[in-house]
Image: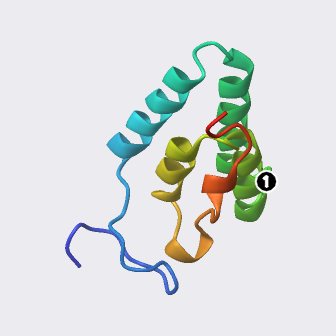
Amino acid sequence: MVGGGSKHVGEGSKPRATKDDAYAYLRAVRAKFHNDSKKYDDFVAVMTNFKARRIDRDGCIKEVEQLLKGHRDLISGFNAFLPKCLEIKNYYFGAGEGR
């Protein structure tokens, strides 16, 4: 398979995100919340808890969806790291958009 790694059934056909993509996304989250460090810290805590297996995949997605509600660009960016079947849908209806 080109690009390395294996795809699991149900992941869809989008390209795998790289570690560089993850760091760039984390920088984008930090930049978006530069005036709200608690929200950024909460996001990092969710990712840390997921990596440490203190929360499962579905719990991680739900917490991120709540933290990033109203930030379409960040939710869209987060979706790049999810299998197509688990992407956060309807994020364009989030609170705070266009207000």
The residue shown at (70%, 37%) is 96
Note whether 32 is above or below 91 in the view shown. above
Scheme of image coloration: rainbow
Q: Position of residue 53 (x, y in %)?
A: 73, 53
The residue shown at (48%, 81%) is 8
Q: Position of residue 47 (x, y in %)?
A: 65, 42
| Quadrant showing the N terminus | bottom left
Label 1 Cα neighbours within 10 Å, binned few <14 / some 14-19 / many ≥20:
some
In the image, taking residue 89 as reference, residue 1 lies left or right, namely: left
Residue 42 sits in which quadrant?
Answer: top right
Q: Residue furthest left?
A: 2
In the image, taking residue 5 as reference, residue 30 lies left or right, namely: right
Q: Residue furthest bottom?
A: 9
Q: Which residue is mark 1?
A: 55
Task: Pick the residue in front: 42 or 50.
Answer: 42
Q: Position of residue 50 (x, y in %)?
A: 69, 49
Q: Secondary structure at mark 1?
A: loop
Q: Position of residue 26 (x, y in %)?
A: 49, 33
Residue 19 sits in which quadrant?
Answer: top left
Tell me which amino acid carries mark 1.
Ile
> Total number of numbered labels?
1
In the image, taking residue 2 as reference, residue 91 lies left or right, namely: right
| Quadrant showing the C terminus | top right
Note whether 38 is above or below 42 in the view shown. above
In the image, taking residue 24 as reference, residue 70 lies left or right, namely: right
Q: Residue furthest front?
A: 99
